[in-house]
Image (cartoon, rainbow, N blue to C red):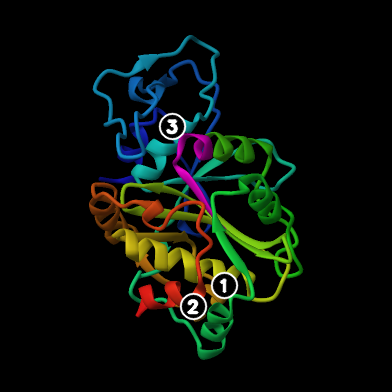
Amino acid sequence: MRADERIGTLGIEIEKGEAGHVLFDCQLPTANCQLPTACCQLPASPLDLPAPPHHPLPMSQGQSLEITPQILLRAYSIGMFPMAESADDPSLFWVDPEQRGIFPLDGLIVSKSLAKVVRSDRFEVRVDQDFDGVILGCAGGSAERPSTWINERIRKLYRDLFNQGFVHTVECYQDGALVGGLYGVMIGGAFFGESMFHTARDASKVALVHLVARLRKAGALLLDTQFVTPHLMTLGAIEIPREDYIAQLDVAIGCTANFYVWPKDEIMPGRVALEALA
């Protein structure tokens, strides 16, 4: 299915962006805007996604299509994700890259030095304990990334999805302080990585190792990174064509994977994470 056909299930119009990306305004005030009925339904569980609707629900003239957690889930399930131009820009747009970044779950590159850090338990690794701390850390920027796209609307949307059990975090603590972590959306056996941060060396890498270990143990099939950077390539990320990504996505979201294959409140030893990657 083409990008315009997939986005048609969301009732959103298309515009072309740079670098071959397809951009979708998430709030287009149009007279003919239609909101899919399925997007008004709250999924009963992370595995109960609404199917593409057959009978869209018309909206009144002049009304804008506001992105909701349900629309966000539907977008992920058809291969799209939202971004903002900057943290100060309240508007959002959908992105559908022609080349998609993924981490093959059997292809994470863990160097000897990184394995040593993971095994040392320098960081106390937990999951789903401090969503707000993680997303604020990701939104804060760094020397390598002075600005981010995480605006207030994104923080609220993903907080809502966290409350519903669709968003998860992996967090690294040192001396009781959150010093690194990541967050993403999980649907079935697909994990859509959104962002990561660190204030202590190697903390985000350790979080990634623990994420991949957890996903493999859970039986997940896909770890989406959206884009590939030189840094992510050193850890095993690759690019695949959009069509191949959609094929993998369709299989992954149809399978069952339990993010809490290791208990939510359990501190994960690095040794256990490395054993899961062996």
- Report which quarter residue 152 is drawn in: top right
Residue 62: percent from left, percent from top: 55, 13
- Specify the farthest residue to the front: 266
- Specify the farthest residue to the bottom: 112
Q: Amino acid at mark 2?
A: Leu
- Marks 2 and 1 sit apart, C-alpha to C-alpha, by 9 Å
Query: Observer-nearest residue: 173 or 255?
Result: 173
User: As displayed, is residue 19 above or below residue 278?
Assistant: above
Q: Is 58 included in the stretch rendered in magenta?
A: no
**The C terminus: image quadrant:** bottom left
Q: Nearer the viewer, mark 3 or mark 2?
A: 2
User: As displayed, is residue 41 above or below residue 198?
Assistant: above
Asked if marks 2 and 1 touch (Cβ < 8 Å), the reply is yes
Q: Earlier in the sequence, mark 1 or mark 3?
A: 3
**Label 3, on which residue?**
71
The label shown at residue 248 is: none
Q: Which residues are magenta?
A: 161-170
Query: Observer-nearest residue: 143 or 278?
Result: 278
Residue 248: percent from left, percent from top: 27, 58
Horizontal placement of 59 versus 231: left or right? Answer: left
**Label 1, on which residue?**
205
Horizontal placement of 88 versus 57: left or right? Answer: right
**In this figure, what is the number of numbered marks?**
3
What is the secondary structure assignment of the residue under circle 2? loop
What is the secondary structure assignment of the residue under circle 1? helix
